[in-house]
Amino acid sequence: MISDKVNDDIQEKANLLLQQIYERQNTPSVKRKNLELELVRLIQSYMSNGLDIESILIDVTNDGINASVYLNETTNTQAKAVTTKEP
């Protein structure tokens, strides 16, 4: 049978280890990589649903965040868009 003191020591060491792991996961470098991974997954999901993305620009300033998505459009797609307009 493990004594209460030994059990408390084990629990304290486990708590310290969990805290260290949590702190390592919250570094700016890890947060940046997680953001990059989330962005890649989001973009891939849109592309797999048929959105033909040429480029994406994201601008972060003191005023806020601006994002622009540019699509690859073929001449046929542009022609169809023009012919569907009514005068």
Image (cartoon, rainbow, N blue to C red):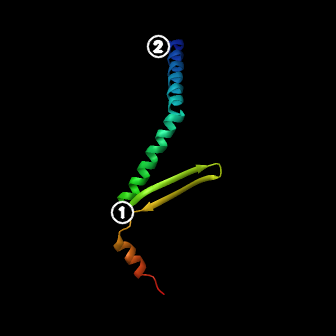
Kind of residue at badge 2: Ile
Do the CB atoms of the residues marked 2 and 1 lie less than 8 Å apart?
A: no
Which mark identifies residue 81?
Answer: none
Q: Position of residue 1 (x, y in %)?
A: 45, 13
5 and 76: which is toward the camera:
76
Whether 51 is drawn above or below 80: the answer is above
Whether 41 is drawn above or below 80: the answer is above
Q: CA distance from mark 2 to mark 1?
A: 60 Å
Residue at label 2? 2
When asked about the image quadrant of residue 43, the answer is bottom left
Residue at label 1? 50
Q: Residues within 10 Å of mark 1 (few under 14, many from 20)?
A: few
**Residue at 52% over, 20% down:** 11
Q: Position of residue 21 (x, y in %)?
A: 49, 28
Whether 21 is drawn above or below 62: the answer is above
Kind of residue at badge 1: Gly
Lower position in the chain sequence, tag 2 or tag 1 = 2
Q: Residues within 10 Å of mark 2 (few under 14, many from 20)?
A: few
7 and 15: which is toward the camera:
15
Q: Nearer the viewer, mark 2 or mark 1?
A: 1
When asked about the image quadrant of residue 74, the answer is bottom left
